[in-house]
Image (cartoon, rainbow, N blue to C red):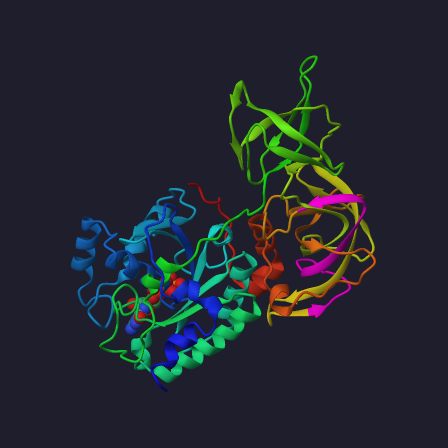
Amino acid sequence: MSSQLLPRLAQEDESTDALSGPQTVTRQARPLRFITCGSVDDGKSTLIGRLLWDTKAVKEDQAATLRRDSTGQHNELGLPDFARLLDGLQAEREQGITIDVAYRYFATDRRSFIVADTPGHVQYTRNMATGASTADLAVLLVDARAGILEQTRRHATIAALMGIRQFVLAVNKIDLAHYDEAGFQAIAREFREIALSLGVRQITAIPVSALKGENIVLRGDDVMPWYSGPTLVETLEKATQRTGQSTGFRLPVQRVSRPGEGFRGYQGTVAGGSIKPGDSVVVLPSGVEANVKAIVTYDLVRNAAVSGDAITLVLDRPVDISRGDMIAAIDQRPQTGRAFTARLVALSPDGIVPGKRYWLKAGSRRQRVMVRPVSALDLATGNWDDAAVLALNGIGVVELDFEEDAIFDAYETNRETGAFILIDPDTLNTVAGGMIDSRRSRSGRFDALPDADRASITLPARLIEAFLKTEFARAHVGEIRVTRGEKE
Ligand SMILES: Nc1nc2c(ncn2[C@@H]2O[C@H](COP(=O)(O)OP(=O)(O)OP(=O)(O)O)[C@@H](O)[C@H]2O)c(=O)[nH]1
């Protein structure tokens, strides 16, 4: 096959250019976050170790130990066993020091990185879910000799579920596959199809030897003259960062404060965008418009507030607002309506019964809703099959019908105002968690999403965590370990 084909495999259409196309790269303030996924022995630890080693993120004492310990000892090539760089974590664990997930930091001249490291056999942990929910990119490893495995498909599916939209396929141990170009191409092609079916369009496939350090940080031109695409590090340097919220200002009202005559403030935590005195806002669902007079936190009067701030908002005119209402940017409003489509993970043994009424809780709002499953994801095949019920742990697309107006953003644009839970009104148990896709017209049938979009579902970390703890996930996804989440 011609060497020209390779870069095209990695970037067959325009949409992949963000990963591998020529760009001016400047060092960015926020590190790029990524996770690595692979089957046992595919070489994750070696790959991360290699990244740290070749970007000189390894401390001198660690490096000396590695050189001393491992000459010819740990592998047949006489190279250091880079996976040992991660052993510190293991040792700390064995000593009982609580380290839940290791976030490894390293940097190049152009960018800094954080890789969520879950060493050993533990792949589908709550840690991974937590790591993946904030990751910008997933590096999926396969063994060049084995190619794509069922496991690879599952890894890719979970990563896509967690909202990751950029995949790097590291076809590792290419040295053991005689640097075979045709084999690499076939694996890359197969992977590309899987990724596309999950709605992931930014895909770069790279033939690498983690052990020998080929196409990780340094190029492997001597042994793979046929590969002219980017190295792993170049790809990471050019990857885009994902943003959690792209909506305007959102304040779900948790409490109306009336400490004395004449003062009325609306309290809550900003769930999107920013606000300053003088800004125009709309109160939903009433649609009344007003301007911000003041922003107060504790005793302080502030001149601005951003997402995550707990504030009391004072408006310039009296407005009838109660708990559960939303104050939003006047020019970037959330969607208001009685019918929405959403994706659900069913967490109750009863599953989700069509036509049953549930309580839907989103932020401080609680509303009655009727739920009708439309389709369900088969995790083994990645197919979305028509479904009238959603069994326990099922992931599905559903229609929601409310008795009164509901206010949401699409989860893809705002993870706070687009997420909800369902509560069984009889037992008061949480029976599902979900993400809003879009509003739909009530009379109309479900507007089928294009296949790729339908597959590219994104779940909040806590739902995936709940899902991963179930027997179903144990059987289908792999070993589960529950630990605390990430701390920064
Ligand atoms: N020849 C060769 N061997 C490699 C390469 N990458 C990793 N290995 C070897 O493959 C074995 C497994 O590598 P690890 O890095 O421990 O694999 P892992 O995926 O982290 O494995 P687990 O931690 O068990 O999940 C080790 O003996 C490595 O030296 C490579 O590119 N080429």
Splitting the image into 4 quarters, where does residue 309 fall? Answer: top right
**Residue 38 visible here:** no
Residue 285 picture location, percent across and down: 75, 39
Residue 82 forms part of the magenta stretch: no
Give the dominant element type of the magenta stretch: helix, strand or loop: strand
Residue 7 picture location, percent across and down: 38, 75
Vertical comparison of 262 with 151: above or below: above
Vertical comparison of 190 with 112: above or below: below
Which residue corresponds to the image point at 38% horizontal and 84% vertical from the top-left?
182
Q: Would you say 51 lies left or right of 461 here?
A: left
Observer-nearest of 13 and 189? 13
Q: Which residues are magenta?
A: 385-408
Q: Would you say 408 lies left or right of 189 here?
A: right
Q: Would you say 224 lies left or right of 484 here?
A: left
Observer-nearest of 185 and 35? 185
Which residue corresponds to the image point at 79% horizontal and 63% vertical from the top-left?
445
Observer-nearest of 280 and 131? 280
Q: Residue furthest top?
A: 261
Residue 277 picture location, percent across and down: 57, 27
Ligand 1's image quarter is bottom left
